[in-house]
Amino acid sequence: MKDERYTRKEAVAISYNPDLNDAPKIVAKGKGKIAENILARAEEFNVPVQEDASLVELLGQLDINQSIPEELYQAVAEVFAYIYKIDKEKGNAIRSNDT
């Protein structure tokens, strides 16, 4: 069993703009301090984060600006569905607080 104190963080950021790209692509990735910086920026800009170590491991093998391969579409689609759900919940919470 790995000790959490000695597990090196890893993060991968993906982006998808259907007007510009056919598939989502890697926009940032890193381990250790770089991963911590990626996660801090996500928090700073209220970007939802989904933790999935096996997906991060697969995406971490790709290069920055590389499109997601078709074999990973299903897994990445689940991430986008999660983000959509979180955004919708936050939007509903904001609207209910405004009334």
Image (spheres, helix red, strand yellow):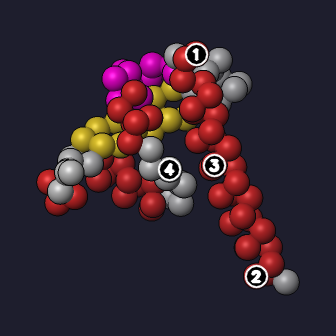
Q: Nearer the viewer, mark 2 or mark 3?
A: 3
Q: Amino acid at mark 4?
A: Gln
Q: Is residue 84 above or below residue 23?
A: below
Q: Earlier in the sequence, mark 2 or mark 4?
A: 4
Q: Nearer the viewer, residue 4 or 38?
A: 4
Q: Quadrant of residue 43?
A: bottom left
> What residue is drawn where x is 69% and y is 49%?
84
Q: Tell whether 50 sits left or right of 96.
A: left
The CA distance from mark 2 to mark 1 is 41 Å
Q: Nearer the viewer, mark 2 or mark 4?
A: 4
The CA distance from mark 4 to mark 1 is 20 Å
Q: Are marks 3 and 4 in contact (CB under 8 Å)?
A: yes
Instruction: Provide the residue designation for mark 2.
Output: 97
Residue 28 drawn in magenta: no
Is residue 90 in sight in this rendering? yes
Q: Earlier in the sequence, mark 2 or mark 3?
A: 3
The part of the chain drawn in magenta is: 59-68
Instruction: Provide the residue designation for mark 3.
Output: 82
Q: Amino acid at mark 2?
A: Asn
Q: How many marks?
A: 4
Question: Please, what is the dominant secondary structure of the magenta stretch?
Answer: loop
Instruction: Provide the residue designation for mark 1.
Output: 70
Q: Amino acid at mark 1?
A: Glu
Instruction: Provide the residue designation for mark 4.
Output: 50
